[in-house]
Amino acid sequence: MTVLNLPPCNFKIKSSENKRFIFDNIRKKYIVLTPEEWVRQHFVSYLRIEKKIPASIIAIEKELKLNGLKKRTDILVFNKNGTPEIIVECKAPSVPITQETFDQIARYNLKLDAKYLIVTNGLSHYYCQVDKKNKTYHFLKDIPTYK
């Protein structure tokens, strides 16, 4: 797998029936190891270890309905009150981050109303804080550590 621009991690990886699987500590099961899953697992680890976000407030592939269609967020972090705080959209390292990627996460946020949006392909990371009052985004160097 591609070396990412995130801290290295020790993952449980296994092979079965010519496929590789990675253990997801949030969902408590093995998941097929795709390039996007590789990014997702690294980013969850970054949130937990570097940003001190408890696993209990992180959801992976949380379903939401948007214009009658079922969609899934890659990573969703809730605040202490149980409302969405951070949405993370993960792409495979080979997928460039484009305006379309930002449009996708912005559509999700119309429904979820999170404070922070993050887009990553494991190599490049974009952090935005939503200014709800002025209906704008402010790009940040990083997100704050969990308190």
Image (cartoon, rainbow, N blue to C red):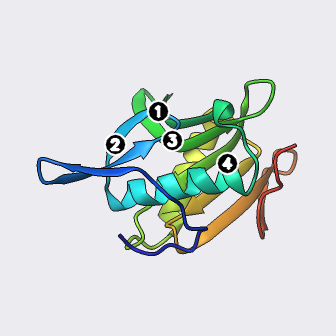
Q: Position of residue 124 (x, y in %)?
A: 57, 73
> Relative to 48, is 28 on the left or the right?
left
| Distance between the alpha carbons at the discs numbered 3 and 4 | 18 Å
What amino acid type is highlighted by mark number 3? Thr
Secondary-structure class at tag 2? strand
Q: Position of residue 111 (x, y in %)?
A: 61, 33
What amino acid type is highlighted by mark number 2? Ile
- Crowding at label 1, few (<14), some or many (≥20) Cα neighbours within 10 Å? few
Looking at the rendered image, the disc whose residue lies closer to the viewer, 2 or 3, is: 2
Q: Which residue is mark 3?
A: 73
- Contact check, label 1 and label 3, Cβ < 8 Å: no
Secondary-structure class at tag 4? helix
> Relative to 6, is 138 on the left or the right?
right
Q: Position of residue 98 (x, y in %)?
A: 50, 70
- Contact check, label 2 and label 1, Cβ < 8 Å: yes
Looking at the rendered image, the disc whose residue lies closer to the viewer, 3 or 4, is: 4
- Crowding at label 4, few (<14), some or many (≥20) Cα neighbours within 10 Å? some
| Distance between the alpha carbons at the discs numbered 1 and 3 | 14 Å
The first of marks 1 and 4 along the sequence is 1
What amino acid type is highlighted by mark number 4? Arg
- Crowding at label 3, few (<14), some or many (≥20) Cα neighbours within 10 Å? some
Q: Which residue is mark 2?
A: 31
Looking at the rendered image, the disc whose residue lies closer to the viewer, 1 or 3, is: 1
Q: Which residue is mark 1?
A: 27
Q: Which mark is residue 48?
A: 4
The first of marks 4 and 2 along the sequence is 2
Q: Position of residue 32 (x, y in %)?
A: 29, 47
Query: Residue sitting at 48 percent across and 62 percent down?
Result: 100
